[in-house]
Structure formats: C-alpha cells, structure tokens
Image: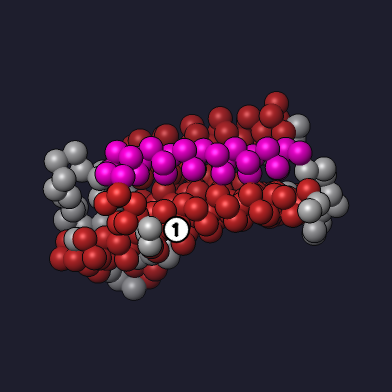
Amino acid sequence: MDATGMVLAAAVAFVGSHFVMSHPLRGGLVRVMGEGGFLLVYTLVSFVTLGWLVYAYIAAPAAAPLWPVGEVLWAIVSAVMLVASVLFVGSLIGNPAFPHPTGNTTMPGEARGVFAVTRHPMMWGFGLWGLCHIAVFPDPSNVILAGSIVVLALVGAALQDRKKERLQPDIWRAWEAKTSYWPFAAIAAGRARFGGFRPHDWAGGLLLWLIASWAHLPLAGWGAGIWRWL
C-alpha cells in the first residue's frame, strides 16, 4: 500500500469507527459495557484511529497539486473561513444540540444568530474548514484528511438529527421547523430571520480567524487569511 492509500485506510478507519460506534453498535455496546465502559472504548478507538490518520498524513510525501490555486481562490477561502469561525464560536454557547446537565433540553423560542443560519453551526464550521483546506491545498493526502473531517461533520450532523428525532421527537422536530440543516435555507424559506448575533459571535469568530490564519505561517510555512497579503 502506498502512502496515499495508507492515509485513505486510516481515514476510513477513523470516520467509519466513529459512525459505527455512535449509531448501530452503541446500544448493544452500552448494554454489555455500561455507559462508562462504552465511553472509554469509544474514546480509545477514536484516539488510536486519529493518531493513525495523523501519522499516515505526516509520513506521506508531498505530491503534485490536483488543480492550480490562485490568489482569487485564496481570497474566497479566507472569507469563507471567517464565516466558519463565527459559526463555530457562536455554537459554543446556547447550543440546544449539546447535552444538558439536567437531562432536560431547553429549546430557544426562535432561531437567532448562528442558529438562524443553520441548526448545526459547529458541524458546518468544521465542514467549511475542511472544504476550504481542500480548495487551497489540493495535495491528495490533504484532500483525504480534510475530506474525512467534512464527512464526519456533515454526515454526523444529519445523523444527529435522526437521533434527536427519535429521542426527543416533539422538541427537536419543533426546532427543525424553525431552522435548517443547510446554511441559510431556513432564512431563504422565511422560517428564520438573519440577525440576532451576540457580541461574542463576531468578536470571538474574528479573533479565532485571525489567530488560526496567522498560525499557518509558523506551522505550515505559508500565510493564510489577511496575513497572506500583509
């Protein structure tokens, strides 16, 4: 197996084990191991397969890019990454998809801010991150690595909807009626209104974008975001 094939095998193991253990096998494993035992095994498998993926990626030699990348594409990707950063930071507070400490999920009265854009702002933040990194760094191994993050995030978000519909049918379907899986689809359909962003959504997203894009220079050897042109 060549280096790119090893990256692909590791990516399949990482993403596949996550989906299989999170959904079809979860119930049976919890019955056998208990919740604590399942979480321990799940965490161990996740770290082992992620470590394999990172190792295989680092070990893979650089290859010719699959398409040319110019400054226009870099500018588009930089703007999209700012959107992804705002979505991610905005998802950290008040996200109804997160488990509630009391076990009782409290749903917002209406979708506002990042949740008006999509009910899965964190997952779309990761998904956009992966798509942007594929666009400007079309090395085959990187396409596989970033693509695995895209699949894990966006397919995982859709599976989360199905799980929430089963476990919390009334409240989650009511939330789905006000929001959308696809970004801006609920706004376009008139089910949500654009706006209602909190100060930390914008400030935190901008700060994350500035720091993460600056870090590309010492970590990867090239500038990203506005640092590319400064």
Image color mode: secondary structure
Residue closest to the far right = 64
Q: Let me know if residue 94 appears in the view.
A: yes
The picture places residue 162, in percent across and down from the top left corner, at 32, 66
Residue type, label 1: Val
> Mark 1 highlights which residue?
20
Circle 1: element type:
helix
The picture places residue 185, in percent across and down from the top left corner, at 39, 68
Q: Residue at x 14, y 48 (%)?
A: 104
Please state which of residues 8 and 38 is positioned toward the viewer in this rendering: 38
Give the residues drawn in magenta, as a range: 33-59
Displayed quadrant of residue 211: top right
Give left or right: position of 157 versus 71.
left
Displayed quadrant of residue 39: top left
Q: Residue at x 72, y 38 (%)?
A: 58
Residue closest to the far top = 218
Displayed quadrant of residue 118: bottom left
Question: What crowding class fits label 1: few (fewer than 14 Cα within 10 Å), some (14-19), or many (20 or more)?
Answer: few
The picture places residue 135, in percent across and down from the top left corner, at 68, 55
Q: Say which quadrant the C terminus sits in.
A: top right
Q: Let me know if residue 230 appears in the view.
A: no
Please state which of residues 14 and 68 is positioned toward the viewer in this rendering: 14
- Taking the magenta stretch, the answer to whether it contains residue 218 is no
Residue closest to the far front = 32
Q: Residue at x 30, y 49 (%)?
A: 32
Q: Residue at x 50, y 49 (%)?
A: 126
Give left or right: position of 46 versus 213.
left
